[in-house]
Image (cartoon, rainbow, N blue to C red):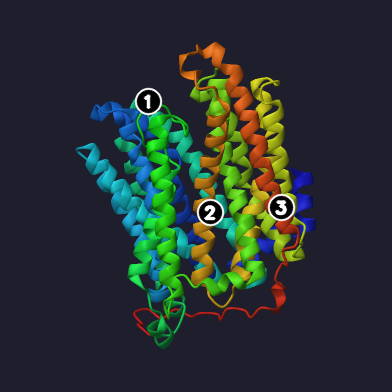
Amino acid sequence: MGVLAIVLERLNIVSAFRELGGSRQRVDTLLALAASQLLVQLTFLPVTLTIPTVSDYFGVDVDDGSWTVIIRLLVLGSTVFLTARLGEKFGHVRIFFIGICVLTASSLLAATAQSLYQLIFWCGLGGFGGALVISNSNAIIALVFRPAERGRAFAVPVTASRFGTLLGLALFGLFLEFISWRLVYVSAMLVGLAAIWFAYPALKYQRFQWGQSGEERGKVRIDYLAAAVLVAVLGTFILSGSHLHDGAESFTTPDALSYHLPMHLLSLTLAGLFVVLQLRSVEPFLDFRYFKRKYFSMALFSNTTCHLSMLTIFTLVPIVVEDGLGYSPLVVTLVLLPHQSFGLWLPALAGYVYDRYNPRWMGPMSLFLIASGVGLLGLFAAQVPIWGIPLLLLPASVGTALFISPYNAVVMNTLPENRGFASGMLETTRQMGHTVGSTIGATILGLSLPVTIEFMTADEARSYYQQGFQIASLAVVWIIVSGGIVAIFQKVPALMRQPDPPELSPQPGADD
């Protein structure tokens, strides 16, 4: 501990983070963001543990029970850009705070659900609340913190988010085993009340609340028809990669083809309609001109590949551990816990390095580390003992934790004139990366398996699952590498040349 203290003191990391809390407004902001991100993460990934228990309680198949999770991800992923635009028009902090309230209320209502349909509906409402929160969080950081502070500022909610995942994984299993699935939602509601308590003080900053003058707000126009079409595009795209059809979870069986092909076609058709609407609109809902900002678009692409890798890992590792190696789901959790734990401390270090040194190598190095970890996993997962899989994942664990907080800052810093658009696209590429990652991994693995796999015994099928896992992992590696290559040419904005946000003073009750 003495050596660690000396290192931290020499690097000046502690004092560098202490600077973030230099005013009451900054402290209020960081507390609000940390509490809200913990809440969002607690109510999403760990809630997947409830699916079997909820299915048994309501007497339905697991496929039906899984809609409690699918609907959350579907609503969240399809509405994050819309909710960012709502923040641009009505105030990022106000929409952010409403999102916390919606998510808290939905957790309470889910805990009292008397049927599966009620539970699914309230979970969908929770997905919308989560979208309201996360799509405006990035803009709030851009409102309050200088460009040269945002790496560290983003590390705070990123770390809180990872803590929420680990807390949920640790507690929810106990609740499900010994008490009730309803306690999962009750605990989320209690965390939501705490988040409301921590976020409410932020509302007293009138300028912080709106982020722009009344005259500027009046100029913001939202084409709600185009917004609805975009939500439909993203929603059908997410559903097109989900196995909601009869039969095996495959992309090649007759049942699968009769579902996936029409869904892909519908998604493409709606996307074409949306593009036509935007090109003919005087005030487009999604302004394509911002994508001409080369470094902004490059940062979004690299961000997509990073999050693609994250869901690829969470999709493929359970398959190789359970079907390829014959272990239980509990072992999957133990294998992935070390991977998640790096997010508790490395984002802070990464944010510090980004703010202080503004290095161009951080993005590509992080993505190449992720690619090497996924590649090692694909090549050697079947040859090492089960405890060796976290070691193979180690480069990906480090790379993921190093990437997120600096690149959140990069995206926001490369489009300083429209933080609402930048925040919305940051979260949209994150969610679409998750969808594409899980879809690509499952698709390639499914195509690698023989059609007779369902008729084989578990022992007979293992070698085929191992081979399919290897092919899928190595294919994904090249996508991640492409993101790293793009990141090599990413010009990191000159942080000190960008204007600082004004210091805001509290104005209770002011309405501009």
Q: Element at badge 2?
A: helix
Residue lying at the far left of the rendered structure: 114
- The x, y position of residue 334, in whole percent, is 56, 28
Residue type for callout 2: Arg
* Direction from residue 56 to residue 477 in the image, left or right: right
Which residue is pictured at 35% across the width and 38% down the height? 184
Q: Can residue 43 be seen in this view?
A: no
Mark 2, residue position: 430
Mark 1, residue position: 177
Mark 3, residue position: 484
- Front-lying residue, 403 or 445: 445
Labels 2 and 1: the sequence-earlier one: 1
Labels 2 and 3: the sequence-earlier one: 2
- The x, y position of residue 462, in whole percent, is 57, 17
Image quadrant assignment for residue 119 = top left
* Direction from residue 251 to residue 149 in the image, left or right: right
Residue lying at the far bottom of the rendered structure: 215
Badge 2: few (under 14), some or many (20 or more) residues near its Cα, within 10 Å? many
* Quadrant the C terminus occupies: bottom left
Q: How far apart are marks 3 and 1 (CA)?
A: 43 Å
Q: Element at badge 1?
A: helix
Discs 2, 3 touching: Cβ within 8 Å: no
- Of badges 2 and 1, nearer the viewer stands 2
Relative to 394, residue 57 above or below: above
Which residue is pictured at 50% across the width and 24% down the height? 330
Relative to 154, residue 172 above or below: above
Residue type for callout 1: Glu
**What label sits on residue 458 in the rendered view?**
none
Residue type for callout 3: Gly
Labels 3 and 1: the sequence-earlier one: 1
